[in-house]
Image (cartoon, rainbow, N blue to C red):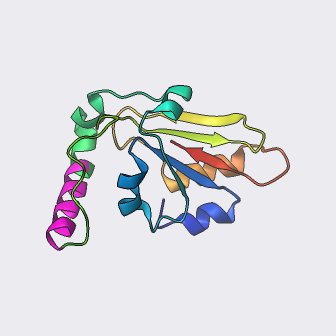
Amino acid sequence: MVRRYAEIAQVGIREVVVFHSPAEELRHYVADFPFAVIADPTKRLYAEFGVESAPRALLSPRAWAPTARAVLRSAWRILRGQERPPARRQPGGRLGLPADFLIAPDGRILAATYGEHAYDQWSVDHLLELATRTPLPSGPRREGKS
């Protein structure tokens, strides 16, 4: 999403990402993100949108390769002093499942997907397809992502 953000913005989508981490922890990881990031350590927004946590978030074989790549990439960056190690305790837990929502300017949810594992989320291509085929009311298109 970060690498292809220009394409997302070009079709009028405003991306918002919600993480179940405290703001002070997120600041170190999202400073260069081109979109809005909301810290939700109490998972209030997660609950409001029906987003769950479950062991299958990391236990699904479909999540293993992306998780291993992320761990290796982070370990290398931590060893080189380019990244901080993750907090020992995650207030919201580490088993959050992703969810994606395409939300109209008037607040209606036009499309939603609840992930089955940690890396089960919309691709940029899928998001762009949804945005171009979903009729939106007049005004800028906006996308909220949790």
Residue drawn where x is 68% and y is 36% of the image: 110
- Relative to 7, residue 136 above or below: above
> Quadrant of residue 35 in the image?
bottom right
Q: Residue furthest front?
A: 24
Q: Residue at x 21, y 57 (%)?
A: 85
| 5 to the left or right of 10 | left
Q: Is residue 121 above or below residue 141?
A: above
> Chief secondary structure of the magenta span?
helix
In this rendering, the answer to whether 141 lies above or below 135 is: below
Question: Residue 127's x, y, as percent?
Answer: 57, 50
Q: Is residue 24 above or below residue 7?
A: above
Q: Which residues are magenta?
A: 67-80
Q: Residue at x 41, y 39 (%)?
A: 41
- Along the viewing direction, whichever of 96 and 137 lies nearer the viewer: 96
Q: Is residue 78 magenta?
A: yes
Residue appearing at x 20%, y 72% in the figure: 81
Spot the residue most to the left: 79
How many numbered marks does the figure carry?
Answer: 0
Residue 50 left/right relative to 24 = right
**Residue 139 rendering spot, x and y as whole percentages:** 83, 52
Assess whether residue 54 is covered by the magenta stretch.
no
Expressed as whole percent of the image width and height from the top left, the position of residue 138 reads 85, 49
